[in-house]
Amino acid sequence: MNNQFDYIDKQILLKLRLDARKAYSQIAEELKVSNSLVHQRIKKLTQDGVIKNTTFILDEKKLGYKTKSYTGIRLREARFAKDVMKELSKIEEIAECNFVSGNYAIFILIFAKDNEHLQKILYDKVHLINGVAGTDTFICFDTCFKRNIPID
């Protein structure tokens, strides 16, 4: 699609970004277009990979995960990166894993029940992965805001 969205595409994406469960018929009504047009556009945006999936956003605190941290991982050697990331994907508490530049090769987002749980994740799981040379962890006190990228 080459990021060439017309007005209707942008409006559909904006509405879905606010509520992914919004009925297509409701979107059509709000945009004053046919229901079938909304269906066709969403299908095309999905086929083009613009819309990857719809997900529920879970409140980690209400699920008992009180500690949120970002952890930078240093590798013994760059050649370990893919294997380390594969092993990290097996740790359920890791919500996100990014291959980055700078002092760390990998940056991960961890949700833990508390600080003791975080310590166990780091020392009993992450540090035992072959290729991990060390970590630095940054506790997140609060998330001020979170949003999707702008739709141009």
Image (cartoon, rainbow, N blue to C red):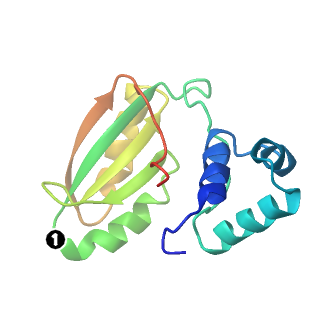
Amino acid type of disc 1? Glu
Residue named by callout 1: 77
Tell me the crowding category of disc 1: few under 14, some 14 to 19, or many 20 or more residues within 10 angstroms, Cα based.
few
Q: Position of residue 70 (x, y in %)?
A: 32, 40
- Residue 57 falls left or right of residue 87: right
- Quadrant assignment, res 141: top left
* Residue 55 appears in the picture as rendered: no
* Residue 49 appears in the picture as rendered: yes
- Residue 57 falls left or right of residue 84: right
Can you say whether 6 is above or below 54 in the image? Answer: below
Can you say whether 48 is above or below 62 in the image? Answer: below
The residue sitting at 55% across, 25% down in the picture is: 61
Q: Position of residue 8 (x, y in %)?
A: 66, 56
The residue closer to the viewer here, 52 or 120, is 52
Q: Position of residue 74 (x, y in %)?
A: 19, 57
The residue closer to the viewer here, 148 or 113, is 148
Farthest residue to the left: give it. Answer: 103
Quarter occupied by the N terminus? bottom right
